[in-house]
């Protein structure tokens, strides 16, 4: 029963998660903290499907660690946030599509960094070599100045392809994860049926959008330290909604371009630019705040293997917003051409790595929350 | 715990208004209350920081009187019913005046904890029987402990971790100083008041052996290994009046594979009413269907303690799986009773006969674990009076049980101001007590779930208030 040497193989992680869940299921003191423990209580055994499901319900608020009487050095060695993080990484890697790209989760931080660096280098080098030097190095103003540097069609083709592929891969991973979670339905958990689950999906979207379970059951995450705090949730909201606003800015701009024939750059007071500024500020404050919290966080409940992946994603988001806002503020200077290439390179790096990094957590979490909404309706604690 | 030799020449000293011995619910409540009233306070916790909080770490709720539904408690739990429950479990061994103080103060204690950073929640899964009577801590007892240490730090209480008290300077019932081992040195912490909130002696096997003899070596201690009773012993040696039967301790039957100390809640085995319990001779020895949890839970520790080797084996078949709280250790599994006996180290023919006789004696009824049903044995000694179902559906499962000691009853006598009373009948001039170290004043026998935390919280506040008052003169 005591905690073994830390085994980071797949089998070792799953066996450790199962061992710890059996301890938690006999205790249940944490059931008010989040969705993980009520979902656990509907089971008496924990296979890979159950563990992947529970791990993706976990928002890493760490209340269960700070409030556990069995954390190390207790011989039971319970550390749920850490083992759940390790299981999540397994689910990310094993539901990736195409499956061969699951290996990108090994050394993810370095790989994400290399992919982004390559995208950046290609964009800068390509722009320098191919763009009209007058447009690239001159001070450009007015409609069409971006496209004088990089033609609109080229941008649409490259980013349309990258984003389309990311959506396809994320969708496939979500479907694969949905099946993963049902793997142990015969031996544990609740039969959730196969019917439509619109209400459950709506509930999951609500719980995901509001981060219902990133608050330790009411007081906030015990993060970065032992005292509950709402900071992490605030920074996560800034990050997520900042990202969505930036995405909305791009979408509105696309609409302007094709539906209304309005060509970028747009005025500071235009809708796409306003959305981009607000989103960009959120996407600077959020990731910067999350990075700052990480540097002071209690390392014990953290999974050290995740530092690279999580850190790379935050840095990439930060680079996206910083380069985007830099482009906005210096778009009428001679620096615009290079800033555009840099921003687009970073965004390309982000798009390419979206389905193979931390970004996936949102999709798998929504799937887990959907299953939870169904189980809560149909199942009961054992 | 510490092996390094102490350096006597490095005796440091410190003077405060109030010295609090202990670091759980009662000690923390007292320390914060005294500090908020303006006293300078030093809290001395024997455990290191990560293991701080005494047995409060393992608790989860507080029995609370209420006249109407509250945020987390359903219906009502009036004073008289609470007192009746206490009278029933103690057989009247309680100081009714102090008991009523605890009961009446319980609601305010919950509110005080809430105002000091603790959140409450409705009853936990598996404890719905307590939804009316017990306010549950969100996250359990360690959340309470953490919140109170934060409150202590915020009010300027000086906390010493990993600091066992090795001596108390007490003259004629008057406290002068505590001598503490801290960071390899001896520290003398002088104070105008001592609040003793350092728990019982249940983790002191030598002391338990004085009353139980060699069987004490087979006891498992459910709570903190730091409750050695050192402060309790010093107070009694200094002439404090005793309460509580020193020979008694609260014992439940827990999984025999549990750690020697600190196994806490997860080591419980709730399967007893669903099967039979045999001793090392493979024979039954008590009615497994006598009563509901928690009563049945609380008697089995003592029953198992009386058997050879302090072991019992609960045996069930496949039918009741999922009807009781999942135990933390996996069951021992076998397809036949004979094979199960071999795995348990029992005589197979005897166990087979015990099960055969039991099965033959079971009278059909309508099985209902939620009431005292009519499934019972006939012509069997001892009888199983409820929930008796033949053990016939493999795979068969067994859990070996041992006595798990929760707390001891011996304590110091106090009055309504939490002031410690001396054996000569006089009150101590400046020593107060709160929590398990004085719980025997209220709970002289038996157990009522969650009342220990109520006693600690109510008397912690009284002791803190009185201590500050004493300091002000």
Image (tube, rainbow, N blue to C red):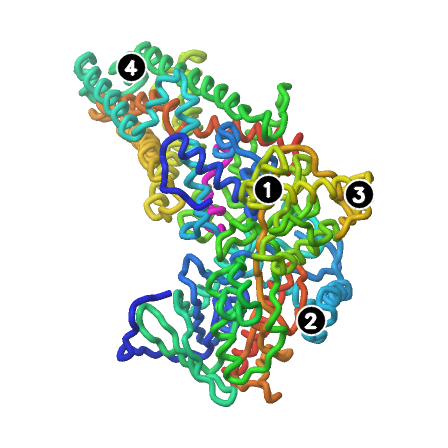
Residue A134: where, in percent of width, then height? 18, 15
Q: Earlier in the sequence, mark 2 or mark 3?
A: 2
Residue sitting at x 71%, y 72%: B93
Do discs 4 and 1 share a chain?
A: no
Tell me the distance, in whole angstroms, between the alpha carbons under discs 3 and 4: 85 Å
Q: Which mark is nearer the camera, 2 or 3?
A: 3
Asked if residue A288 is positioned above or below residue B237 in the image, the reply reads above
Tell me the distance, in whole angstroms, between the alpha carbons under discs 1 and 3: 26 Å
Q: Which mark is nearer the camera, 4 or 1?
A: 1
Sort mark 4 into few (<14), some (14-19) or many (20+) by Cα contacts within 10 Å. Answer: some
Q: Nearer the viewer, residue B30 or A165?
A: B30
- Cβ atoms under marks 4 and 1 closer than 8 Å: no
Q: Which mark is nearer the camera, 2 or 1?
A: 1
Residue B25: where, in percent of width, then height? 54, 64
- Residue A65 sits inside the magenta stretch: yes
Number of marks = 4
Would you identify the image quadrant in which residue B240 lies? bottom right
On the image, numbered disc 4 is attached to which residue? A147
Do discs 2 and 3 share a chain?
A: yes
Q: Earlier in the sequence, mark 1 or mark 3?
A: 1
């Amino acid at each position: 029963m005591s905690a073994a040497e830390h085994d980071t193989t797949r089998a070792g992680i799953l066996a450790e998660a199962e061992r710890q869940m059996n301890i938690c299921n006999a205790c249940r003191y944490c059931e008010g903290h989040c969705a993980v423990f009520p979902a656990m209580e509907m089971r008496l055994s924990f296979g890979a499907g159950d563990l992947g499901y529970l791990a993706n319900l976990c928002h890493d608020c760490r209340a269960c660690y700070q409030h556990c009487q069995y954390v190390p050095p207790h011989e039971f060695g319970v550390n749920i946030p850490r083992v759940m993080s390790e299981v999540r990484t397994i689910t990310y890697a094993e539901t990736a599509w195409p499956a061969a790209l699951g290996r990108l989760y090994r050394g993810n931080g370095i790989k994400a960094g290399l992919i982004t660096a390559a995208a950046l280098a290609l964009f800068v080098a390509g722009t320098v070599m191919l763009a009209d030097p007058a447009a690239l190095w001159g001070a450009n103003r007015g409609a069409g100045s971006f496209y004088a540097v990089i033609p609109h069609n080229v941008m649409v083709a490259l980013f349309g392809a990258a984003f389309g592929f990311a959506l396809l891969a994320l969708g496939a991973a979500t479907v694969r994860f949905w099946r993963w979670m049902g793997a142990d339905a015969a031996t544990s958990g609740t039969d959730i049926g196969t019917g439509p689950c619109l209400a459950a999906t709506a509930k999951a979207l609500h719980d995901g959008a509001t981060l219902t379970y990133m608050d330790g059951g009411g007081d906030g995450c015990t993060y970065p330290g032992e005292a509950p705090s709402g900071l992490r949730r605030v920074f996560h909201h800034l990050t997520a909604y900042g990202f969505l606003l930036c995405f909305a800015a791009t979408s509105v701009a696309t609409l302007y371009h094709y539906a209304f024939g309005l060509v970028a750059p747009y005025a500071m007071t235009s809708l796409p630019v306003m959305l981009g500024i607000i989103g960009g500020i959120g996407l600077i404050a959020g990731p910067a705040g999350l990075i700052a919290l990480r540097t002071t966080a209690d390392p014990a409940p953290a999974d050290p293997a995740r530092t690279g992946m999580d850190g790379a994603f935050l840095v990439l988001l930060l680079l996206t917003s910083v380069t985007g806002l830099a482009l906005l503020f210096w778009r009428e200077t001679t620096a615009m051409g290079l800033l555009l290439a840099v921003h687009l390179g970073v965004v390309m790096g982000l798009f390419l790595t979206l389905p193979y990094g931390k970004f996936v957590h949102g999709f798998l979490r929504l799937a887990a929350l959907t299953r939870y909404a169904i189980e809560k309706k149909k199942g009961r604690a054992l | 715990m510490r092996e390094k030799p102490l350096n006597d020449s490095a005796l440091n000293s410190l003077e405060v208004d109030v010295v609090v011995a202990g670091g759980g619910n009662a000690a923390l409540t007292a320390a914060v209350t005294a500090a908020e009233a303006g006293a300078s306070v030093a809290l001395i916790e024997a455990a290191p920081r990560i293991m701080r909080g005494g047995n409060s770490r393992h608790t989860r709720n507080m029995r609370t009187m209420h006249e109407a539904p509250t945020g987390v408690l359903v219906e009502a739990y009036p004073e008289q019913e609470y007192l009746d429950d206490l009278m029933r479990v103690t057989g009247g061994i309680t100081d009714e005046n102090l008991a009523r103080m605890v009961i009446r103060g319980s609601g305010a204690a919950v509110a005080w904890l809430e105002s000091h950073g603790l959140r409450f929640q409705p009853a936990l899964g598996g404890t719905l029987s307590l939804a009316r009577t017990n306010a549950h801590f969100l996250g359990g007892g360690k959340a309470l402990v953490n919140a109170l240490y934060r409150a202590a730090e915020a009010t300027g209480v000086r906390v010493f971790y990993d600091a066992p008290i090795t001596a108390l300077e007490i003259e004629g019932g008057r406290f002068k100083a505590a001598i503490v081992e801290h960071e390899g040195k001896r520290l003398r912490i002088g104070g105008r008041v001592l609040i003793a909130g350092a728990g019982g002696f249940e983790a002191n096997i030598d002391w338990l052996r004085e009353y139980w003899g060699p069987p004490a070596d087979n006891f498992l201690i459910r709570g903190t290994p730091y409750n050695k009773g050192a402060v309790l012993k010093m107070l009694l040696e200094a002439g404090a009046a005793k309460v509580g039967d020193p020979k008694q301790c609260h014992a439940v039957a827990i999984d025999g594979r549990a750690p020697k100390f600190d196994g806490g809640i997860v080591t419980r085995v709730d399967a007893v009413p669903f099967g039979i319990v045999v001793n090392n001779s493979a024979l039954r020895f008590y009615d497994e269907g006598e009563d509901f949890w928690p009563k049945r839970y609380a008697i089995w520790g003592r029953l198992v303690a009386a058997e050879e080797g302090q072991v019992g084996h609960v045996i069930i078949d496949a039918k009741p799986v999922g009807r009781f709280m999942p135990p933390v250790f996996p069951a021992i599994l076998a397809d036949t009773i004979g094979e199960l006996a071999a795995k348990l180290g029992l005589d197979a023919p005897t166990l087979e006969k015990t099960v055969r006789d039991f099965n033959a004696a079971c009278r059909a009824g309508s099985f209902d674990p939620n009431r005292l049903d009519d499934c019972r044995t006939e012509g069997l000694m001892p009888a199983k009076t409820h929930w008796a179902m033949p053990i016939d559906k493999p795979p068969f499962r067994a859990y070996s049980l041992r006595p798990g000691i929760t707390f001891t009853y011996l304590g110091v006598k106090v009055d309504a101001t939490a002031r410690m009373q001396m054996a000569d009948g006089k009150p101590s001039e400046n020593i107060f007590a709160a929590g398990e170290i004085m719980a025997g004043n209220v709970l002289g026998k038996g157990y009522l779930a969650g009342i220990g935390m109520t006693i600690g919280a109510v008397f912690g506040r009284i002791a803190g208030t009185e201590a500050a008052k004493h300091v002000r003169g």
